[in-house]
Amino acid sequence: MDTHTPAFPPSAAQAHARLARFVPHAGVAYSRRRNFDLGAEDHSNVSTLSPYLRMKVLDEADVSRAVLAQLDAREADKLLTEVWWRTYWKGWMEQRPSVWSAYRDDLTRLHNEVQTQSGLRARWEAACLGHTGIAPFDHWAQELAQTGYLHNHARMWFASIWIFTLGLPWQLGADFFLRHLLDGDAAVNTLSWRWVAGIQTQGKTYLADADNIAQFTEGRFVGVTGLAPSAPPVPAPPLPPRRDISRLAPYTGAPSDRAGLLLNSDDLMPPDLAKIGVTPVSTAYFDGTALQSPWHTAPMISTFRKALACDIAPDVELLANVQSITYWAKAQQLDQVIIPHTPVGPVRTALRAAFQTSGIPITEVRREIDSAAWPLATAGFFKFRKHIPDLLARFAGHRPSS
Ligand SMILES: Cc1cc2nc3c(=O)[nH]c(=O)nc-3n(C[C@H](O)[C@H](O)[C@H](O)COP(=O)(O)OP(=O)(O)OC[C@H]3O[C@@H](n4cnc5c(N)ncnc54)[C@H](O)[C@@H]3O)c2cc1C
């Protein structure tokens, strides 16, 4: 297991190696120690696999299979629950896309308010730069900006202090994370911030507490003062109604069609094209990281994602912006473009708009695991959780011992 700063090599082989190194620690050690934030120099008690899971270089099946090959399902329960929790958030958002669009609308308004209201701008800047005077908060703001990663407990404390102690809008905090996290994800990040704010599980908030911070940072931050004593839920509209996840149209190209494959910053792994009988004549990568925020995103995110794309598909053509997708398709004389299905988020919005304008037919291919798991996120996580054994049986070949 890595014992120091988890630098993230942009390599699929390294992602699998990191998983293999972590598996022996994924049982009792993980469940006992996973809540400790030991500092930027030592995240060895957690997997630090999230940037690879985010880009689909690894998926839930890869992690579940690797873990269950060495550990009993009961021992691995905590880790598997976390891994499938991510899937749950993805499926939940897929069935309520208006939650993402409402967040983006709020952010447009707040972007304007930050430009025009000097008091808000000063408080927001101090929080983003780690200049608030709250030592652990300032440390986490800087750790995130420097490394692109934060431990889960630090994310919870940070979000709580942002909302309840500093009194800043949760949407600006979610945006700060999306501008810096290597694993920043439209669904997981937005819904986690909503959860801390008491909007997601309505009425249930998360309050950062000085004793809890001291205990779970092993004394790195003792006697923190000035934290909010209570966390009243942030007022918000009720949850929108659920809608079914749309079925995707099958590939209808002719065998003679020139098809291109468009990997993107939501999914770097080519879908199983043999299943639809297509051999792409060209592969491109569209990096939509900049679309994640109205402000600049940290360059390390795009650098990491592009390098990972080149590692996976060495002949890949890197597309700088949405407009270059059409140039690529025209230059390659493509009749069809195949895209790994993009989940709710800015990349989906941009790609669909680009292809509507260009008139080039696209086929989106959704992974079987997503098609099976996402529709199960109909209500709370505990309902979803009951399906995990079936998902493990189907996608990780796991048969529970009697
Ligand atoms: C406010 C806030 C914002 C967050 N934003 C993101 C985000 O943008 N992208 C993201 O991937 N995760 C996000 N998380 C969830 C979680 O913090 C990270 O997934 C985790 O810290 C990644 O580190 P790891 O790979 O070492 O996790 P491990 O503890 O090793 O867990 C293994 C995997 O399980 C999944 N996972 C773990 N914890 C959670 C969780 N609480 N919710 C959902 N999935 C989880 C991740 O894919 C992770 O890689 C957020 C949590 C909070 C509280």
Image (tube, rainbow, N blue to C red):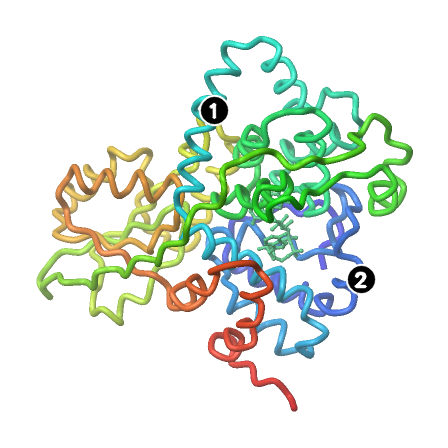
Of the two numbered discs 1 and 2 on the same chain, state the one appearing first in sequence. Answer: 2
* Residue located at (71% from left, 45% from top): 5
Q: Is mark 2 within 8 Å of ligand 1?
A: no
Report x, y in % for residue 347. Answer: 36, 42
Q: Is residue 200 visible?
A: yes
- Residue located beneath label 1 in the image: 295
Tell me where residue 16 sits by quadrant. bottom right
* Residue located at (57% from left, 30% from top): 176
Secondary structure found at label 2: helix
Left or right: where does residue 324 sit relative to residue 10? Answer: left
Tell me where residue 167 sits by quadrant. top right
Residue nearer the viewer, 357 or 85: 85
Secondary structure found at label 1: loop
* Residue located at (49% from left, 47% from top): 187
Left or right: where does residue 302 sit relative to residue 230? Answer: left
Dot 2 crowding, Cα within 10 Å, few <14, some 14–19, many 20+: few
Q: Is residue 183 visible?
A: no
Report x, y in % for residue 298. Answer: 53, 31
- Residue located beneath label 2 in the image: 32
> Where 323 falls versus 54 (above or below)?
above
Number of numbered discs overlaid on the protein picture:
2
User: Looking at numbered disc 1 in the image, what kind of residue is underneath it?
Assistant: Trp
Report x, y in % for residue 86. Answer: 55, 56
